[in-house]
Amino acid sequence: MQYILLVRLSPEGIDATAENPQAPLEAERSVSIPGVSALGIYAVLGPYDFTAIIDAPDNDAAARWSIAFSAKIRGEITTMPAVPISHLQDQGGGIDVEQMSEPLPGQSGG
């Protein structure tokens, strides 16, 4: 299963990255959790500094990797499982609306 990590650097993390732009990559490569592989790290614009994508066997392994990476990169991380769109389809190939949550206020129930 893939996970997306949204990273906000702390002031110390910003200083470390400014001094060594390779610091995030070095941090990513130095984290070793059995069964977890890092698929990439990307600098992004907006409220986050970086995003990383990992492959992990379960939430526990993803959480361990996220915590270790956060400590090394000196940042705050939001970790989210990434669900392939194909998993949202029912057997007939469409979205199973019966499984979806209630509509937001102001939206019709369809």
Image: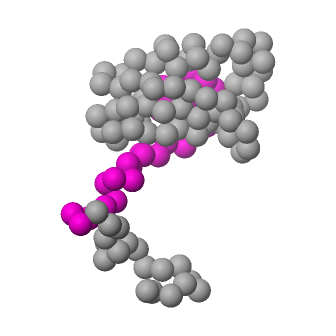
Which of the two residues, 26 or 45, is positioned nearer the viewer here?
45
Res 72 → quadrant: top right
The x and y percentages for residue 9 are: 68, 32
Q: Residue at x 40, y 74 (%)?
A: 101
Q: Is residue 12 visible?
A: no
Residue, x 63% and y 26% (percent of image)? 74
Span shown in magenta: 66-92
Q: Residue at x 34, y 32 (%)?
A: 56
Quarter assignment of residue 44: top right
- Give the left or right position of residue 14, taking residue 95 as reference: right
Residue furthest out toward the front: 93
Q: Quadrant of the C terminus?
A: bottom left
Q: Looking at the picture, how far across and down is residue 31, in whole percent?
A: 46, 18
Q: Quadrant of the N terminus?
A: top left
Residue closest to the eye, 10 or 46: 46
The question of residue 71 being in magenta is answered with yes
Q: Position of residue 32 (x, y in %)?
A: 40, 17
What's the residue at 31%, 21% (across, down)? Answer: 34
